[in-house]
Image: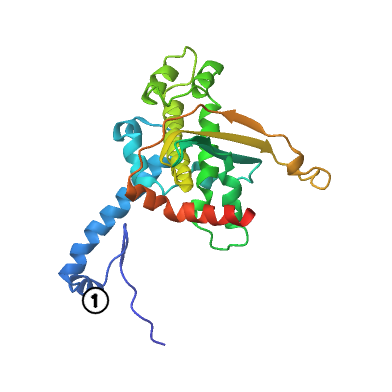
């Protein structure tokens, strides 16, 4: 019975045959040229995502949080919990409102709108829900995580108004608090504050205002009933623990940025109208 000849081995593994070497040499030069940038792109992307999900490091500080966020958000967003997934134990809300001037020159305050609830209605029964339908839930989680490390004085600064005072002053005020949390959690909150202000401003645009005077957001959480008490305890019966934040100056959104929010806002508007 004939057997195929054995291929020689060396310390690094199987030695390529002459036929394999010939095929490698026969690869089109364009294929070889394209392979290098693709490999480099994959390596760089992997390093950036790893830097994003890892805790704060000198390399991340050197690269810059803003630069990293610009690349990752929103299409490549990841979180450390993907390596240790846990069932959600808290229900959160993210509510926004605004003071705006209408066409008659009257100032109006919009009612609080819970965007998490509206996003949940978008996802319900949709097997391929949009990625943006988790936008404010993740934003509230990020805020809660950042502020959980702050002391009472720092939390008081978060609740202050910054529609006349520039929001940029908040960072130095938070870092100047003795015994408070440091740069990592302060910057993490401030990134979320910028996103929250953008979202609140974009939602206020649904009211077709002449001008938006100021916007505000608030978040809350409540513990989910335990599995053992699921029949006797209902989530709606649980009290919410609110986190308050002051009024903020509206974000200066360009037409292009409003277009980016367009699909998200249109979905929210459709859901809100269906509830009326």
Residue at 21% from the left image edge and 68% from the top image edge: 31
Residue 47 picture location, percent across and down: 34, 45
Position of residue 75 relative to residue 179, above or below, is: below
Query: Could you tell me how many numbered marks the image carries?
Result: 1
- 195, 269: nearer the viewer: 269
Residue 62 picture location, percent across and down: 30, 31
Q: Is residue 49 left or right of residue 19?
A: right
- 218, 152: nearer the viewer: 218
The quarter in which the N terminus is drawn is bottom left
* Quadrant of res 243: top right
Residue at 28% from the left image edge and 56% from the top image edge: 39
Q: Residue furthest right?
A: 232
Position of residue 28 relative to residue 213, above or below, is: below
Task: Give the residue pinned by disc 1.
Answer: 19
Residue 178 picture location, percent across and down: 47, 12
- 77, 159: nearer the viewer: 159
Residue at 63% from the left image edge and 44% from the top image edge: 88
Mark 1: few, some, or many residues within 10 Å (few <14, many ≥20)?
A: few
Residue 20 picture location, percent across and down: 25, 73
Q: Residue furthest left?
A: 29
Residue at 59% from the left image edge and 43% from the top image edge: 114
Q: Is residue 26 left or right of residue 214?
A: left
Residue 85 seen in the figure? no
Q: Residue furthest top?
A: 178
Q: Is residue 63 left or right of residue 251?
A: left
Residue 17 seen in the figure? yes
């Amino acid at each position: 019975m004939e057997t195929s000849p054995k291929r020689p081995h060396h310390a690094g593994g199987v030695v390529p045959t002459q036929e394999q070497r010939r095929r490698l040499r026969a690869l089109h030069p364009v294929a070889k040229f394209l392979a290098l940038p693709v490999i480099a792109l994959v390596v760089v992307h992997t390093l950036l995502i790893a830097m994003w999900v890892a805790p704060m490091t000198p390399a991340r500080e050197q690269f810059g949080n803003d630069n990293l966020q610009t690349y990752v958000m929103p299409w490549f967003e990841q979180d450390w919990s993907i390596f240790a997934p846990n069932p959600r134990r808290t229900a959160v809300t993210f509510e926004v409102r605004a003071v705006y001037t209408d066409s008659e020159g009257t100032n109006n305050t919009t009612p609080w709108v819970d965007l998490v609830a509206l996003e949940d209605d978008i996802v319900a029964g949709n097997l391929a829900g949009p990625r943006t339908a988790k936008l404010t839930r993740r934003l509230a989680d990020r805020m809660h995580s950042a502020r959980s490390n702050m002391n009472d004085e720092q939390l008081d600064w978060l609740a202050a108004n910054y529609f006349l005072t520039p929001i940029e002053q908040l960072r130095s005020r938070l870092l100047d608090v003795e015994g408070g949390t440091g740069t990592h959690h302060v910057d993490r909150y401030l990134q979320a504050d910028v996103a929250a202000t953008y979202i609140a401003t974009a939602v206020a645009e649904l009211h077709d205002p002449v001008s938006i005077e100021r916007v505000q957001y608030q978040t809350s959480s409540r513990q989910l009933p335990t599995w053992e008490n699921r029949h006797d305890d209902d989530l709606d019966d649980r009290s919410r623990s609110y986190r308050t934040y002051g009024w903020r100056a509206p974000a200066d959104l360009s037409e292009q940025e409003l277009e980016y929010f367009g699909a998200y806002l249109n979905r929210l508007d459709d859901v809100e109208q269906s509830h009326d």
